[in-house]
Image (cartoon, rainbow, N blue to C red):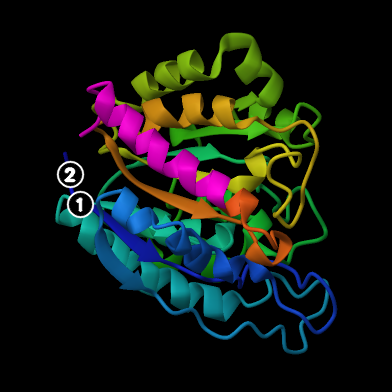
Amino acid sequence: MRTRVVLDAPSNLGLRPPAPGTVPGCHKLAGALREQRVVRRLGALEGGVVVPPRYDLGDWQEGDGVFNAAAIARYTRVLADRVEGHVRAGEFPVVLGGDCSIQLGAALALRRIGRYGLAAIDGSADFRHPGNSDRIGAAGGEELALSTGRGQADLTDLEGLGPYLRDEDVRLFGMRDDDEDRAEMTELEITHATVGEIRERGPADIARAVVQTLEVPVLDGFWVHLDADVLDPSVMPAVDSPDDGGLFPDELAALLRPLVGSPRCVGLNVTIYDPDLDPDGTAGALLADLIVDAFDLAGADGAER
């Protein structure tokens, strides 16, 4: 079993303000999950924190591209340094976000090392880019497009390494059945499964089948991206864009276990949960339990590292 290391990446740079003059509260995710004792419960080492730049839209206006782009680029490099160090040391980083733009840090880190896949468990594809939208701005809804080379060069080609992910190395789980990005995902042959398809095939079965496609010689391993908005808002209302028709906890648990239990999985990041929207901490406790149980049960099944 590889050593787990919990690393905080409390960046909210990739989200729009929830209201004028405010900032997104997902930067408190890491602290809230630490209050649930995830470090101890995971048996993990302390990885510290990668402090993000200040959230500042400045004079950004619609049409200016991704806001906070320079700050996100700087943060991506610094976070990538930390993730790369842990992966090269044979450790398993568990990165607590933050919004989904932190996934760029993992993608860049792994691109420096070799060719890696991504298993993204997310309520949406986060695939907004200039080719399909005139509302570019929030990198937290665009990180998969950016990681696969779609978007402005100051984010898609850091260190001349873009794209960080190949389309054929991406697996998406948890899009809503009516997601408008499904057609483009299909056209690009990006493997994806909606909530309805996951239920039809069974979450554990579909996860095991996908793991087999990622445990192939052409890939050096894969990363897991978990966005809390994949859960139905009846159990996870504390996200910036709660959409009905999401997974329920037992379904997410069954999906997550085979992924983190694979010996080729090299790390996990958790994003979007907003403690400001969860005053009694119920949703945060659920999220912490799901993460811890995924690792515990993977180990109990003899599948983990």
Q: Residue at x 63, y 82 (%)?
A: 55
Which segment is the magenta one?
285-305
Q: Is residue 166 visible?
A: no
- Magenta stretch: dominant SS? helix
Q: Nearer the viewer, residue 129 or 213?
A: 213
In this image, 74 relative to 199: left or right? left
Q: CA distance from mark 1 to mark 2?
A: 6 Å
**Residue at numbered disc 1:** 91
Describe the element under mark 2 as helix, strand or loop.
Answer: loop
Residue type at numbered disc 2:
Arg
* x and y percentages locating residue 118 in the rendered image: 44, 40
User: Which residue is most to the front?
Assistant: 280
**Residue at numbered disc 2:** 2
Mark 1 in CB contact with mark 2 (< 8 angstroms): yes
Q: Quadrant of the C terminus?
A: top left
* x and y percentages locating residue 82 in the rendered image: 29, 67
Q: Nearer the viewer, residue 256 or 178?
A: 256
User: Which residue is most to the top?
Assistant: 201
Task: Identify whether 196 is placed above or below 174.
Answer: above
